[in-house]
């Protein structure tokens, strides 16, 4: 069912229901008020009749009482259920007016006719007390109430016309921007472009908000799509270079290499180097691709111990000077040991590649625990610092190729750091050196990061 139709049905239906309830309340209250007024009026008449009757001493009580019979009513005088005189009544009134009455006064239905009745004690002509019953048909009042009911129903039904018209208008007003929005979205979907919706004046209402959310979503999608495209083209470009080298040497060897041992050796070396390079690149790409699948394993880690072990391992592997610098004996954090090591190795590898002096692993305690990797190498130009975490970004492409870099290390480190809720901060000055800090949040909440990660995967 269309939203417009739903709005029509609901608003008209609800209004009809509200009106009917209101009208019923008015009808019932009015009828009750009128009936009780009639009973009070009759009570007053009966009081007057009793006092007149009691003060006079009529020879024939029926004569006196006849003068007080209300129009369309009756008067009866009884004692212990026996009529003292025949019922004095209008000939149109039903004969079977009940002998027993439920209350002293009130209303009563006899054969579809409503009566107001009052009973009162009276001193009969024999000096004994008798019961006087005076009843009056409420036919006229009932007819008036019915007319009122009819008027109320007619008014309610007539009121439905403007209500229906306004609900149709409301439906149109509400659904028009949504219909426009859907049309634009369908057009965008068909064109396959990251088009945005035109800005509307109603940008502050819910529909406007939906439009701006759609636009932000489009922006994000476009940005991600562009990044993916860039990533794929960079990755294929990086893979093409070693493949070209391998292909050229293979062709060369095919043509003449086998006869020339020197050329064969050179070709094989180049092929092996390029294969290693390609393997390293594919491994890094796989690391990045697998990021969303990785689960974090939280455990307490002593940063001092970790830095000491890593510095020793790096010194042995690269025969370089990696030093632990810290005044603390133990700095405990809750983190994923494997991932933090992976980040450290990326940073230490860069420090090693882009410097020749000593490399420091500085562990800082205090409010915010921190592990810094500091080198005294070539540094990063100021204008390049904001981009070093981008995939495939390299400050100096030629030199990076010499060092075997693809520009993927820091972007992978950043992804890991984000997943763990730690931040990476860079300070660098050209020809002075670079310090990259792994900053552990002070009010670090493991659960928070875990739930964040569940959201990502
Ligand atoms: P790569 O594999 O090329 O090192 P990264 O993503 O790790 O890729 O680093 C991106 C670029 O940032 C590097 O190409 C390099 O130019 C620069 N860089 C990173 N770390 C350092 C550092 N410690 N000293 C100088 N330059 C660095």
Image: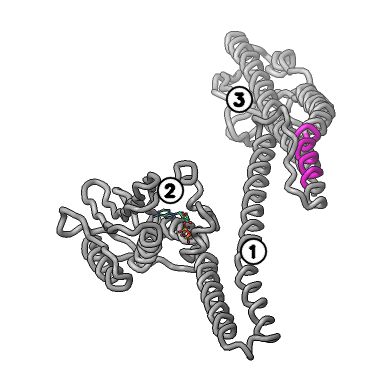
Q: In this view, does 306 lie above or below 249?
A: above
In front: 445, or 123?
445
Instruction: Say which label, 3 or 2, has the lower sequence index.
Output: 3
Residue 235 x, y percent position in the rendering: 61, 64
Note whether ligand 1 is within 8 Å of mark 2: yes
Residue placed furthest toward the bottom:
259
Q: How far apart are marks 3 and 1 (CA)?
A: 110 Å
For the question of whether residue 82 can be seen, the reply is yes
Give neighbour class at mark 1: few <14, some 14-19, many 20+ (Cα, 10 Å): few
Residue 8: name its quadrant. Answer: top right
Badge 1 element? helix
Note whether ligand 1 is within 8 Å of mark 3: no
Residue 281 x, y percent position in the rendering: 53, 69
Q: In which quarter of the image is ligand 1?
A: bottom left
Badge 3 element? strand
Q: Which mark is residue 119?
A: 3
Residue 79: name its quadrant. Answer: top right
Which stretch did the figure color magenta?
171-185
In front: 456, or 153?
456
Badge 2 element? loop
Give neighbour class at mark 2: few <14, some 14-19, many 20+ (Cα, 10 Å): many
Instruction: Say which label, 3 or 1, has the lower sequence index.
Output: 3
Residue 42 x, y percent position in the rendering: 66, 18
Q: Mark 1 points at which residue?
A: 237
On the picture, is 368 further left or further right than 355? left
Q: Which mark is residue 65?
A: none
Q: Do the residues labelled 3 and 2 touch (CB within 8 Å)?
A: no
| Residue in the picture at 70% in, 16% down | 65
Q: Mark 2 points at which residue?
A: 380
């Amino acid at each position: 069912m269309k939203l417009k139709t739903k709005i029509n049905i609901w608003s008209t239906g609800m209004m009809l229901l509200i009106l009917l309830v209101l009208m019923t309340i008015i009808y019932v209250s009015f009828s009750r008020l009128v009936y009780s007024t009639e009973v009070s009026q009759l009570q007053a008449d009966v009081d007057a009749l009793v006092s007149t009757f009691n003060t006079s001493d009529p020879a024939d009580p029926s004569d006196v009482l006849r003068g007080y019979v209300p129009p369309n009513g009756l008067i009866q005088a009884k004692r212990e259920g026996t009529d003292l005189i025949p019922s004095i009544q209008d000939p149109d009134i039903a004969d079977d007016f009940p002998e027993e009455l439920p209350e002293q006064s009130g209303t009563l239905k006899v054969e579809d006719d409503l009566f107001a009745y009052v009973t009162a004690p009276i001193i009969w002509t024999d000096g004994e007390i008798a019961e006087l019953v005076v009843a009056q048909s409420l036919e006229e009042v009932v007819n008036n109430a019915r007319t009122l009911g009819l008027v109320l129903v007619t008014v309610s039904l007539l009121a439905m016309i403007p209500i229906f018209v306004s609900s149709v208008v409301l439906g149109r007003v509400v659904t028009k921007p949504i219909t426009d929005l859907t049309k634009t979205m369908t057009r965008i979907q068909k064109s396959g472009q990251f088009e945005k919706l035109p800005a509307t004046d109603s940008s502050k209402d819910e529909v406007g908000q939906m439009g701006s959310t759609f636009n932000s979503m489009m922006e994000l999608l476009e940005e991600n799509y562009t990044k993916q495209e860039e990533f794929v083209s960079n990755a294929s470009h990086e893979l093409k270079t070693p493949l070209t080298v391998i292909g050229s040497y293979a062709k060369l060897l095919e043509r003449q290499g086998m006869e020339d041992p020197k050329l064969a050796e050179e070709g094989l070396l180049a092929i092996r180097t390029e294969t290693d390079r390609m393997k390293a690149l594919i491994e890094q790409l796989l690391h990045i691709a697998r990021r969303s699948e990785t689960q974090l394993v939280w455990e307490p880690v002593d940063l001092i111990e970790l830095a000491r072990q890593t510095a020793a391992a790096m010194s042995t592997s690269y025969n370089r000077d990696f030093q632990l610098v810290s005044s603390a004996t133990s700095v405990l954090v809750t983190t994923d040991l494997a991932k933090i090591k992976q980040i450290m190795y990326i940073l230490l590898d860069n420090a090693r590649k882009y410097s020749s002096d000593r490399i420091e692993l500085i562990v800082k305690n205090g409010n915010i625990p921190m592990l810094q990797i500091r080198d005294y190498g070539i540094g990063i130009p100021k204008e390049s610092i904001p981009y070093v975490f981008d995939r495939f970004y390299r400050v100096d492409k030629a030199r990076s190729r010499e060092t075997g870099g693809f520009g993927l290390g820091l972007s992978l480190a950043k992804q890991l750091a984000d997943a763990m809720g730690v931040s990476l901060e860079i300070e660098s000055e050209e020809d002075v050196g670079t310090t990259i800090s792994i900053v552990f949040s002070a009010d670090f909440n493991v659960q928070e990061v875990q739930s964040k990660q569940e959201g990502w995967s």
